[in-house]
Image: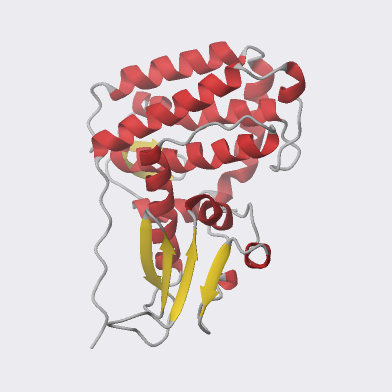
């Protein structure tokens, strides 16, 4: 008997909109406190400084407003689960755009304020079904906002890693959506039912080809916390390092996910 088709996860549009605004607000408040010395610190993203990373966060959010300003495409081209695998092709463009944005906006406070004002205004009445012609492909506003939780949470973690003591908080709904989307992306990349990946309290997915368990404790189990999972999925942390540092527990002969990670790089 073929395995049951997995139901696509749904997200509450109102909660996602609130989460995007809340997490952007968290980053904005933290960036406002950064000194010139802190803005010049290196990050784990190539040769970007904290200033460039902070500017990039506004660019990742401003795409919502910019795409709402563009003509609506005739039909969707991406599903939500396509998005994590469609971003790598734009890495060079994103890098160039980020550097230009940081150079053109020495006042990051003003840049964040303008970005937040536009986003808040545009989300006030834009329907979730409205299609956006994003550079990775056309998809609905509701789905695109879920991808913005990934951008915001991942780069919040990047900023916290770059600036000792910054400790930008994570909006719970944003962290949950980011964790779930990346967990579902793993299940899409490595379909199957032999391994259970647990990221409490937000996600549990079945993946990897092999014998499928139907009851009791699965023979292959991977478990980790949300931020460790996000770092693994985005290439900030290597699988071997996570195991060595006991940030991941993995039991069973099919519990090695190194061949499937990172999902985004």
x and y, in percent, of residue 98 in the image: 63, 30
x and y, in percent, of residue 235 in the image: 62, 55
Quadrant where the N terminus lies?
bottom left
Observer-nearest of 171 and 116:
171
Which residue: 47% across, 13% down?
114
Q: In the figure, 250 relative to 66: above or below?
A: below
Which residue: 52% across, 56% down?
229
Q: In the figure, 234 relative to 34: above or below?
A: below
x and y, in percent, of residue 68 in the image: 35, 27
Task: Report whether residue 130 is seen.
Answer: no
Observer-nearest of 77 and 185:
185
Answer with the quarter of the image where residue 154 lies.
Answer: top right
Q: How many marks?
A: 0
Q: Is residue 205 left or right of residue 258?
A: left
In this picture the colour scheme is secondary structure
Observer-nearest of 184 and 217:
217
Q: Is residue 8 left or right of residue 63?
A: left
Task: Report whether residue 17 is seen.
Answer: yes
Answer with the quarter of the image where residue 81 lies.
Answer: bottom left
Q: In the figure, 137 relative to 243: above or below?
A: above
x and y, in percent, of residue 63 in the image: 45, 30
Answer with the quarter of the image where residue 208 lies.
Answer: bottom left
Observer-nearest of 26 and 85:
26
Which residue: 26% across, 21% down?
124
């Amino acid at each position: 008997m073929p395995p049951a088709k997995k139901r696509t996860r749904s997200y509450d549009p109102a909660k996602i909109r609130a989460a995007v605004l809340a997490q952007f607000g968290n980053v904005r408040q933290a960036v406002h406190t950064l000194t010139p010395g802190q803005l010049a610190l290196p990050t784990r993203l190539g040769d970007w400084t904290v200033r460039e990373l902070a500017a990039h966060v506004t660019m990742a959010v401003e795409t919502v407003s910019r795409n709402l300003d563009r003509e609506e495409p005739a039909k969707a081209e991406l599903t939500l689960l396509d998005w994590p695998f469609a971003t790598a092709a734009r890495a060079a463009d994103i890098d160039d755009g980020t550097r230009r944005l940081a150079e053109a906006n020495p006042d990051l406070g003003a840049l964040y304020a303008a970005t937040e004002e536009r986003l808040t205004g545009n989300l006030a009445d834009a329907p979730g079904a409205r299609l956006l012609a994003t550079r990775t492909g056309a998809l609905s506003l509701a789905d695109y906002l879920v991808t913005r939780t990934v951008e915001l949470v991942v780069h919040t973690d990047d900023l916290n890693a770059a600036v000792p003591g910054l400790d930008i908080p994570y909006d719970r709904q944003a962290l949950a959506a980011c964790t779930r989307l990346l967990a579902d992306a793993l299940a899409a990349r490595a379909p199957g039912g032999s391994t259970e990946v647990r990221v409490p309290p937000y996600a549990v997915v079945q993946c990897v080809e092999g014998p499928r368990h139907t009851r009791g404790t699965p023979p292959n189990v991977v478990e980790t916390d949300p931020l460790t999972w996000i770092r693994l999925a985005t290439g900030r942390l290597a699988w071997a390092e996570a195991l060595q540092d006991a940030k991941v527990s993995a039991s069973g002969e099919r519990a090695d996910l190194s061949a499937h990670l990172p999902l985004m790089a």
